[in-house]
């Protein structure tokens, strides 16, 4: 009888432990930015939201830049010349005195007629003598703000009115002034451009994890709801070698406050050979400005790059450059959530990684194929999953790398309340920082660094 009682007690104890563990792991919900996507019905649209021309400092005429995107199959495009708010492509944007040098060196800017603009939008504009057959949406109100900054503290404003942001030269080492300008316009959004360039991450990648740098960007993201996130891919990523590491750190910092950080991928194109460098794939029912705006805010899109340095943390093991080739990009064809499991269907990839809280938690090598590969991750099988703030997926293939947005983990905890530091010490630090960010100070510092490099 003692043995029977002992066995029964053991069974009850094990059952209670099992129930406890199950309840602990069920006490969260995975929130996906793709939850409204009707896979198999919703279309994938290729776009770029960071583009330049003769209107500012690029090497390509305005019309030539737009036509090249049209030829390469882009579905939407935002012109975001430095300090110039983009208009409809048949309208002449503001001319800034800063860029009169383009005319002096012989670069004349051309614009589309009303008929040409209409043809670009409805797909009748010819490519190699024949109509393309589908249009390209003009995303208006784009402007790369802080136009004249040596430190490249650039911010992309989107959906700005035509009279806002023109000739905004900005301040050195100050992203907030541009974000604030956009925040004051109802319906406009912003995101941080190429933060790794500002941080000089190509020289030292540890800057991505520097608490001061993380706090700098997190304070901006938390203070301004209209600042959606940051670029994780920019152009060929030579000066932004691993900006996704900063993205992870910002996610871990901002999610406890209820703020998701949306990842963006853009070509920042200044020459035609870079059109096929980095861009986004938006999941939308229709290709309109309103749909693009909605998808931006939700994060219902994927980030693609065709050119990336080696990354010992997330891969690739060796850098790659497959710009302007016919190699197909790695592609998500489905991403769905069911309880604590996430299932993806993907193709044109050979490596799938899941990342949570800045670390790889699962990886799968597959045979690259145009056929779909299905991969399901069950967080109940991963120790510590209940403590994750988010998970995200990364596809690597012969044609580049594609990232999903972060799927956030909601454990029912009330978000923290963000409060700006208004202490005397914080105010003094701000004053000192602004002094160091004066353009004259930055120029003197730059010259000093150049002299130091020459001597040592």
Image (cartoon, rainbow, N blue to C red):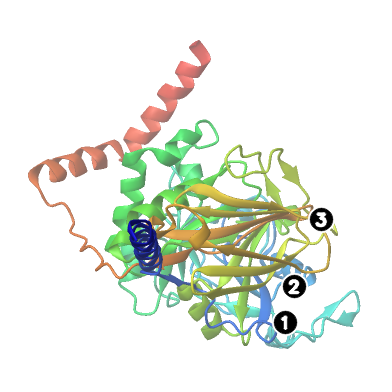
**Label 3 neighbour load within 10 Å: few <14, some 14-19, many 20+:** few
Q: Quadrant of residue 122?
A: bottom right
**Label 2 neighbour load within 10 Å: few <14, some 14-19, many 20+:** many
Q: Quadrant of residue 281?
A: bottom right
Residue highlighted by disc 1: 120
**Label 1 neighbour load within 10 Å: few <14, some 14-19, many 20+:** many
Position of residue 309 relative to residue 163, above or below, is above
The residue most toward the right is 129
Residue highlighted by disc 3: 367
Q: Secondary structure at mark 2?
A: helix
Marks 3/2 in contact by CB < 8 Å: the verdict is: no
Of callouts 2 and 1, which one flags the residue occurring earlier in the amino acid sequence?
Answer: 2
The residue most toward the top is 455
Q: Is residue 300 visible?
A: yes
Rendered residue at 83%/66% (across/down)? 370
- From the viewer's side, name the closer residue of 353 and 191: 353
Residue 98 drawn at (x, y percent): 49, 54
Rendered residue at 70%/64% (across/down)? 65
Position of residue 132 relative to residue 49, above or below, is below
Distance between the alpha carbons at the discs numbered 3 and 2: 32 Å
- From the viewer's side, name the closer residue of 336 and 430: 336
Relative horizontal placement of residue 256, taking residue 295 as reference (left or right): left
Q: Secondary structure at mark 1?
A: helix
Distance between the alpha carbons at the discs numbered 2 and 1: 8 Å
Residue 47 drawn at (x, y percent): 64, 70
Rendered residue at 51%/43% (across/down)? 197
The numbered dot on residue 70 is 2
| Disc 1 versus disc 3: nearer the observer | 3
Marks 2/1 in contact by CB < 8 Å: the verdict is: yes
- From the viewer's side, name the closer residue of 282 and 323: 282
Of callouts 1 and 3, which one flags the residue occurring earlier in the amino acid sequence?
Answer: 1
């Amino acid at each position: 009888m003692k043995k029977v009682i002992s066995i029964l007690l053991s069974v009850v104890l094990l059952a209670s432990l099992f129930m406890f563990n199950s309840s602990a792991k069920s006490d969260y919900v995975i929130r996906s930015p793709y939850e409204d996507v009707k896979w198999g019905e919703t279309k994938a649209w290729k776009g770029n939201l960071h583009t330049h021309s003769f209107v500012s400092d690029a090497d390509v005429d305005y019309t030539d830049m737009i036509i090249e995107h049209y030829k390469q199959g882009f579905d939407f495009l935002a012109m975001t010349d430095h300090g110039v708010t983009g208009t409809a492509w048949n309208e002449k944007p503001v001319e800034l005195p800063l860029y009169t040098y383009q005319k002096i060196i012989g670069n004349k800017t051309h614009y589309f007629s009303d008929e040409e603009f209409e043809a670009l939008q409805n797909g009748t504009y010819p490519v190699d003598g024949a109509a393309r057959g589908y249009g390209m949406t003009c995303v208006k109100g784009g402007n790369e703000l802080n136009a004249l900054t040596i430190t490249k503290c650039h911010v992309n404003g989107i959906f700005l009115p035509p009279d806002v942001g023109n000739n905004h030269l900005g301040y050195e080492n100050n992203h907030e002034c541009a974000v604030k300008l956009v925040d004051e316009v109802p319906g406009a959004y912003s995101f941080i451009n190429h933060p790794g360039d500002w941080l000089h991450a190509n020289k030292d990648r540890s800057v991505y994890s520097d608490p001061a740098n993380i706090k700098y960007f997190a304070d901006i993201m938390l203070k301004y709801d209209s600042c959606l996130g940051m670029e994780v891919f920019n152009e060929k990523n030579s000066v932004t070698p691993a900006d996704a590491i900063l993205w992870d750190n910002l996610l871990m910092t901002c999610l406890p406050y209820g703020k998701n950080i949306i990842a963006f991928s853009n070509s920042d194109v200044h020459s035609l050979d870079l059109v096929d460098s980095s861009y986004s794939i938006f999941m939308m029912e229709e290709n309109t400005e309103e749909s693009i705006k909605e998808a931006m805010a939700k994060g219902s899109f994927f980030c693609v790059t065709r050119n990336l340095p080696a990354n010992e943390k997330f891969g690739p093991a060796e850098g790659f450059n497959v710009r302007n080739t016919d190699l197909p990009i790695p592609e998500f064809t489905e991403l769905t959530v069911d309880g604590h499991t996430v299932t993806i269907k993907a193709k044109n990839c050979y490596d799938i990684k899941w990342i949570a809280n800045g670390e790889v938690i699962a990886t799968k090598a597959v045979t690259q194929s145009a056929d779909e590969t299905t991969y399901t991750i069950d967080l109940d099988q991963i120790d510590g999953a209940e403590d994750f703030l988010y998970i995200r997926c990364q596809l690597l293939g012969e044609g580049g790398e594609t990232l999903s947005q972060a799927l956030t983990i909601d454990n029912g905890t009330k978000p923290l309340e963000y409060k700006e530091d208004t202490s005397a010490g914080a105010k003094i630090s701000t004053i000192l920082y602004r002094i160091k960010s004066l353009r004259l100070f930055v120029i003197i510092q730059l010259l000093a660094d150049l002299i130091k490099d020459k001597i040592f």
